[in-house]
Amino acid sequence: MRKIISILVPLLFSMATQATVINHSTSGQYTSSVNSIGNVQTFQDYTLIYSTNGKSDSKVSAFAGVDKNAFDNISTGNAKSGSAYQNSVTVDTGSVFSFDWLWYSAENSNSYFNDFAFVNLSLGDLSWIADTSTPDWTTGSFEWTATESGLLTYTVGVFNVNDNLEKSKLIVNNFSVSAPVAVPAPAMLGLFALAVLGFSISRRKKVS
């Protein structure tokens, strides 16, 4: 019985979750990001996205594949201009896409000049990350679980709201996709159950 268990258990858990990190190409100096619109720079493995010196809401929304009114809907005002970074990765059903972020805004916390950061997923939704009500230098992690397999295009950006003046920025890194946790096949579970049952019956016969 111990031999059977020693063979089956490793098979059941041999497909444990693993993470594949998406690396950003950098030169060790601040450089313009290739897959971006507006004011986006990379430094080492960090991507810095600025609201100032960006592009119009129409251009950013077209880049992100989102109706521009959708940005106004997740804000408290008119998204005027901004910048965004975009990339793609293949995901499987059950995979977890994630990244880390840090937020800063020169705007005072208010509901009118409420600059904000967002992420849009081609296989998911447009989501709010932070805005002027978020304390400066706040860090966090974004996570999303895939409900289908396919090519996931993700767009992360920052918008100025109701003006184009004060700087807000989002710094992101550690983009990754985890492999889905493997569910043991019914046939393998059945084999394991039969092995345990057979062992139990043989022990009863010996005892009797």
Image: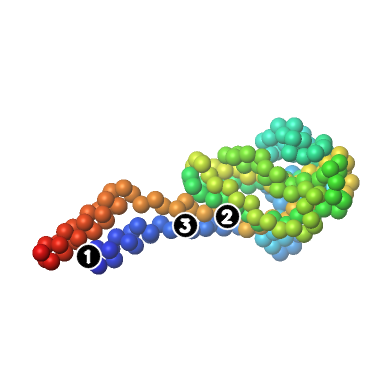
| Residue 118: % across, % down | 71, 45
**Residue that badge 2 annotates:** 176
Q: Quadrant of the C terminus?
A: bottom left
In the orientation shown, which residue stands out farthest toward the front?
A: 208
Which numbered disc, 1 or 3, marks the residue closer to the eye?
A: 1
Q: Closer to the observer: label 2 or label 1?
A: 1
In screen coordinates, is 151 left or right of 37? left
Looking at the image, is mark 1 or mark 3 earlier in the sequence? 1
Q: Earlier in the sequence, mark 2 or mark 1?
A: 1
Q: Can you tell which quarter of the image residue 83 is in?
A: top right
User: Is 26 situated left or right of 151 in this image?
Assistant: right
Marks 2/3 in contact by CB < 8 Å: the verdict is no
Cα distance in 3D space between marks 1 and 3: 28 Å
- Please identify the quarter of the rendering in which residue 48 is found: bottom right
Q: Which is nearer the eye, 82 or 42?
A: 82
Task: Write the residue at 69% across / 62% down.
Answer: 44
Q: Is residue 28 visible?
A: yes
Circle 2 SS class? strand
Rate crowding at label 2 as few (under 14), some (14 to 19) or many (20 or more) other CA atoms within 10 Å. some
12 or 66: which is nearer to us? 12
Q: Quadrant of the N terminus?
A: bottom left
- Which numbered dot is residue 1? 1
Q: Mark 2 or 3 closer to N-term?
A: 3
Q: Amino acid at mark 2?
A: Ser
In this view, 202 is above or below 38: below
The residue carrying mark 3 is 17
Q: Which residue does the image show at 43% across and 58% down from the upper left?
A: 16
Taking the spot 36% from the left edge, 52% from the top edge, the residue there is 184
Position in image of residue 185 (x %, y %) = 33, 49
